Structures are given as structure tokens and as C-alpha cells.
Image (tube, rainbow, N blue to C red):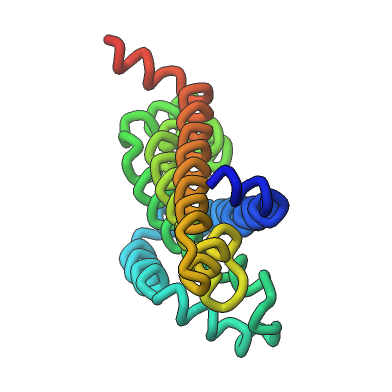
Amino acid sequence: MIQYLTNNHQVVLDALQQHIWLALLPVLLGFVIALPIGYLGVRFTWLYHPLINTCGVLYSIPSLALFVFLPVVLGTKVLSPVNIVVALTIYTTALMSRTVADGLRSVDPVITQAATAMGYRRFRRLVDVEFPVALPVILAGLRVATVSNISLVSVGALIGIGGLGQLFTRGFQLFYLEPIIIGIILSVLLAGIADLIIVLVQRAVTPWTRRGASA
């Protein structure tokens, strides 16, 4: 593997760089889109179950089928990275919309009633009280979405775009084990680092959860 990395380090670095932005850009986009959608599912109770069902259907669509189908809808080329970004954004939005809704629903009504009694209006109560309390649930869902995206990017290699997944296809085509092993190791490391970063962010922005656990 050392010899392979020495001879192909630029190929591996390019694949890793592509993998990172193909996986993490949809996480950011999907998270931003999911916030208002999840809130609407809580604000209008009649919308919650249709939202959950729709998200479940979207998330169950096979990734390879979506990668191939999107160029027809978007008018992009089959080998365009836009297809991967849009597909993974859909998956992230579907997963995070439910997580945001469940997180906000998990807030104790006593907390919201107390905030209202203190003079908090709806938007300020959402931003200053409900959303921070729901953060542990929301960030737990974000961890799942991030790791899932890092895994799903590799599937895009079957249509010519897939970051580290290209090492898998190259290894299978050439019956060469080294690029496959390197691709697996880097994918696992990338997922682990991304998950650790989110955990550290969660610990930083929700210090009260640490105090509760220590108590």
C-alpha cells in the first residue's frame, strides 16, 4: 500500500478532496432546508405525519437509481457532480426534517409555557429556548446524515463520480487490492473524524447536557 500511495498519491488526494465536498456540501444544504420544514411539521400538527411519510419515501429511494434519474429531471450531464450533490441533499433533507421535527416535539411543554410567561414571542422562543433544547436530538440526526452521506458518495463511482469510490472501482477492474483497502480506510477515517467534530460541537454548544450526565 505504501508503494501504491507513493506512485498514486495525487490520485488518492484528488479522490479524497472530491469525496469530502461531495459528502459535506449536501449535509450543509440539507440541514438548512430541513430546519424550516421540520419546524412546520411541529407548528402545524396536521402536517407532521404527511411530512414523516414523505421523508420516509424519499429516503428509501435507491441511491444509484436517483443518481441516474436526476440528469433527466435537472437537464445535467450523467457525469455531472451536481447529480450527486442534489441526490444527497434530498436524502439529508428527508432525514433531517424528521429529526428537527422530533427534536422540537421533544421539548417539554412546561419549558415553552415558562418562556411564554416570561414574555418570549414565538420566533424568539423558538430560537432562544426550543431550538437549543432540541439540539441534542437534532445533532444526533446530523451525525447519522453525515456518516450516511460519506458512505453514499462512493456509490456515485458506478456512474463515474464518487470520490474515494473511484478507488474501489479501479481496484475491482484491475483486480488490485491496494486501492480498495486505501479507499475503505480513508472512508472510515473521514466518517470518524466528521462524527467526532459534530460530537465536539455538540458538547460545546450544549454544556448543560454534560452537567446533567455528570450529576
Count of labels in the image:
0
Residue 101 horizontal/vertical position (percent): 40, 52
Q: Is residue 97 left or right of residue 28?
A: left
Q: Name the outermost residue toward the front.
A: 3
- Which of the 4 image quadrants contains residue 116? top left
Q: Is residue 52 above or below residue 130?
A: below
Q: Quadrant of residue 107?
A: top left
List x then y, in percent, for residue 92.
49, 59
Which residue is located at x 49 percent, y 63 percent?
176
In this picture, residue 110 sits left or right of residue 201: left
- Image height check: is 88 above or below 140? below
Question: Toward the viewer: 4 or 115?
Answer: 4
- In the picture, the quarter occupied by the C terminus is top left
Task: Please report the residue visible at 36 percent of the width from the left and 13 percent of the height from the top.
Answer: 211
Q: Residue at x 37, y 29 (%)?
A: 111
Residue 52, placed above or below residue 10? below
- Residue located 60% across and 51% down the image: 4
Measured from the top left, where is residue 178 in percent x and y? 50, 54
Above or below: residue 112 compared with residue 13: above
In the rendered image, the residue lying farthest to the bottom is 72
Q: Is residue 96 visible?
A: no
**Image location (x, y in percent) of residue 70:** 58, 82
The residue lying furthest to the left in this view is: 215
Rendered image quadrant of residue 19: bottom right
